[in-house]
Amino acid sequence: MPSLKGWADFLGGVPFPLLSDYWPHGAVGQAFGIFNSERGMDKRAAYVVDAQGVIRYAKVYPQGTIPTSEELLAELKKL
């Protein structure tokens, strides 16, 4: 959670919630099919969900890759 707050602050604040799949451990990742049970963590992924709960963008990144703020902000602007 602190890293999400730090990222949101870096972006100048965001008017929507950010999700961390911390507890219950991996529940969201399991629901989305991205939980890596061997490593005990989710694969790196980003989703943009609209106000109606529809996933408008989804991308799973290779291990060690971090999505750029520009990429995600561009997807948000499409909404």
Image (cartoon, rainbow, N blue to C red):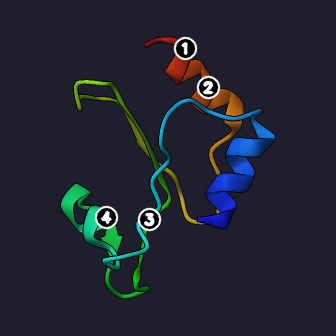
Question: Mark 4, residues whose alpha carbon is within 10 Å: few (<14), some, or many (≥20)?
Answer: some
Coordinates of residue 19 in the picture (x, y in percent): 45, 53
Nearer-N-terminus badge (2/3): 3
- Residue under circle 1? 77
The residue positioned 23% from the left and 28% from the top of the image is 54
**Res 48 → quadrant:** top left
- Looking at the rendered image, the disc whose residue lies closer to the viewer, 2 or 3, is 2
Gap between marks 2 and 3 measured at Cα: 21 Å
Amino acid type indicated by mark 2: Leu
- Residue 24 as seen in the image, left or right of residue 21: left
**Above or below, comparing residue 45 to residue 34 in the picture:** above
Q: Which residue is mark 3?
A: 43
The residue under the point 61% across, 25% down is 73
Q: Nearer the viewer, mark 4 or mark 3?
A: 4
**Which mark is drawn over residue 29?**
4
Q: What residue is disc 2 on?
A: 73
Tell me the CA gap for discs 1 and 4. Answer: 25 Å
Across and down, in percent, residue 22 comes to 43, 73
Identify the image quadrant of residue 64: bottom right
* Disc 4 from disc 3: Cα separation: 8 Å
Is the Cβ of the residue at disc 4 closer than 8 Å to that at disc 3? yes
